[in-house]
Structures are given as C-alpha cells and as structure tokens.
Image (cartoon, rainbow, N blue to C red):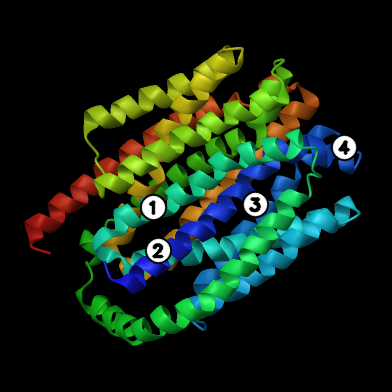
Amino acid sequence: MSDRRSSLLFFIGFLLLSWGLLGAGIGPLLPQISIAFDLPLPLAGQVFLLWSSGFCLGSYITSHLLKRLQLSSLFLSACLAAAIAIFGLSVTPSFFLFCFFYGMTGTAGGIIFTSCHTSVSWFFPEKRQAALSFADFSFSAGTLVAPLLINLIMSNNYPWQIFFKALSFANITLAFLMIPLALAFFRPYSAERNVSLSAEEKTSFSLECDTTGSKKTLINYAIICFSIGFVEWQQNVWLVTYAMSKGTPQVSANHVMLLFSLGMILRRAGSMVAGKSCSDFRLVLLDDIILLGGISVILAGTGTAVMGAGSFATGFALGGVLPAVMASAMASRPSHAPILSTIALVMLTFGGLCSGIYTGSAATFLSPGWTLTAGLFISVLLIISRRAFISALRVHTAACRGTGH
C-alpha cells in the first residue's frame, strides 16, 4: 500500500474514531442532559431521533454532492460544520438549541460516513473488505473508549459539556489535516480515478451477473443494515438506562455498554486481519446462536457480570456482519459505492430511528425493562435476511462463472 493511501486510511480511522466517541457518548450522558434541561429521561433520549434524521439527510445528499464536489471538499466542509455544531452542544442554554445542533451534527455525520465508505471502495479495491473492517474498527474503538472517557470526566467532577468541546476541537484538527492530504492524495488521484470509472462502466458486471442488481438482494441488503442499526443503536443509546433500571449503578452500567463495544471491536479486528468475509454455513450458524443468546442473557440476566457477558456476545456476533455485507455489495459495482453506502447508512440510521421511537415509547408508557425486548425479534429478522443475501450471492456468483463474466 502506498504512503499516500496509508495516510488517507489513517485519516479515515481517526475521523471515525472521533465519531464513535460522539455516537456512543450520548447514552452515558443522557442522565446529565436530562438534569441540565430538567427533562424526563425518556424524553431527553429522543434527541437521537434528530441525530438519525440528520444522518439520513446527510448520507442521502452526499451521493448528489459527489457529482459536483471532490471528496476532499466534502470532508473539509463536513468536519468544519461538525466542529461548529458539536461546540454548540456544549454551550447552548436551551434544549431547543441543543436539538438543533444535534440534528446539524447528525447531518455532518451522514456526509462524513458516506464519504469515508466511498473513499474506501474507490481507493482500496483490492483490500475493500479489510479497509471497511478498519473503518468500522476505528468507529467501534471510539464507542469503546466513550464510556471510559465519560466515567473519567464524571469521577473528576468535570462538567459533562467538556466531552463535546474536546470532540469539536478534534474535528477542527482533522479539517486542517485534510488540506495537505487533499494536495498530496486527492489531486493526484482524481485523474486516475476518472479514467478507472470510465473503464469500469464498460467492463462492470452485466445486470444478469450483478449481485446487487437483484431487487430481492437489495431488499435483503437493506433489511440487514436496518436490523444492525436497530440492535446496535439500541445497545449504544439505551443499554445504560436499561441496566440502571435493573439496579445497576451508572458506572457499572457504562461498563456493560463498554463490553458490547469491546465485542464489536474484537470481531472487526479479526475481519480486518482476515481481509475477506467468510460465509461458511457453520460459522454463520454460530454467529446466529451467539447473537440470540447474547440478547437473551441481557433480557433475562441481572448484575453487571451476567449482563456484561450478554452484551459482549451480542457485540461480537454483530460486529462482523456490516463490513462483509458492504464489501460484497460494493465489489460487484464499485462505481455505485456512494449509492450503496447511502443505502447502508440510511437503513442503519432508520433502524436506529425506529429503535429510538420504540425504546423511548416503551420506557415512557411501559417501563425501562421493556426497552430492549424488540432487539430479540429484530435479530431474528437479521438472521433470515443475512442468510437470504448469502444464498443469492452464491447463486449469482455461480451464474457469472457459468456464463464466463
């Protein structure tokens, strides 16, 4: 791998690390946000709906913006916008403005994530699976560190707003780092990329052999992403509150959530090292058992150790699904990477949006103990759609080999 591409990959890694911190930080900070704005905890948790809506919007407009702007311009603009919005979260005196800035942060996040996935697909075609795993590994590392960082802030009696100020500074720093990276990498590669895209339009798979061309396969791809978003963000945003409802202290509840992130990051590290996905029936079946077992333990168990074990198992089973599915989809149509990334991110976010609506409603009208029950049923949906996606992939691959494409 060239030094220029290594620089881009590490930039993406640090960028997604900061967004992992931000995304996973809202859950542990919900009690502080609720107190600061004098709101019931379930109502304060609904700010995630604004994040989700903004994220979908940002991801959707990215594929259109890429037709007019370079990736470097999008990265720079989105990082600066995010820095302003995140800083606003730390100084706003009203919940209304907090919601506005949080929605703005989500929009910038949608642009950044889609741009990161597009960069990986375009500039790392021979190591797409490993590069996507590295990107998700970096994001998961942020979600792993977030509860620890917040515990450190709380234990030293620092104001909770310092968490957002630090992330605002990180995005400003990354925006300035994009300037030399744009000159060293994106400009030299722009002409090369245009040539490769033109050639790709002529040599890409035909519709008959395009694994992402089938409507059923695309539907399964979307359902997989929706299911991951529902379960993952339910764990990231509501697991702390759920554990506290069972009598777990907040610091220990943060550790339960940390184990979910640890499971995901270890699995993605394994995928990154392996460099390619494995759809062996026995391994997929083992994943399914671990996922259902982990969520069941969280629902039925009590105590930090038991819930932590279930949380780790859930994260481990879930962590390897998205990089493998996205890499398989993008491998068949690299020129459609922004669209495929948009589908994935919108469905991930829509899953999180539905998770927020259900979980907040369950916590408000039933009890916090009901908040994570839907995750078990959504996991079954994930298992079914994943198996259908793998089966369709094998059928199309066999058909392509048979026709000589």
Q: Viewed as shown, does residue 158 lie left or right of 192? A: right
> Mark 4 vs mark 2: which is more N-terminal?
2
Q: Is residue 387 above or below residue 290?
A: below
> Mark 1 vs mark 4: which is more N-terminal?
4
Q: Position of residue 378 (x, y in %)?
A: 51, 32
> Mark 1 vs mark 3: which is more N-terminal?
3
Q: Residues within 10 Å of mark 2 (few under 14, many from 20)?
A: many
Kind of residue indicated by mark 1:
Phe
Of badges 3 and 4, nearer the viewer stands 4
Examine the rendering and report whether any part of residue 221 can be seen: yes
Q: Secondary structure at mark 3?
A: helix
Q: CA distance from mark 1 to mark 4?
A: 37 Å
Q: Residue at x 49, y 67 (%)?
A: 115
Kind of residue indicated by mark 4:
Ile
Q: Position of residue 298 (x, y in %)?
A: 55, 19
Kind of residue indicated by mark 2:
Leu
Kindly check if marks 2 and 1 are in contact, taking CB atoms under 8 A apart as contact. yes
Residue position marked by numbered label 4 in the rendering: 35
Tell me the quarter of the picture where residue 153 sits: top right
Q: Which mark is residue 134?
A: 1
Tell me the quarter of the picture where residue 352 sits: top right
Q: Residues within 10 Å of mark 1 (few under 14, many from 20)?
A: many
Residue position marked by numbered label 3 in the rendering: 52
Residue position marked by numbered label 2 in the rendering: 9
Q: Residue at x 47, y 51 (%)?
A: 138
> Mark 3 vs mark 4: which is more N-terminal?
4
Q: Position of residue 218 (x, y in %)?
A: 38, 53
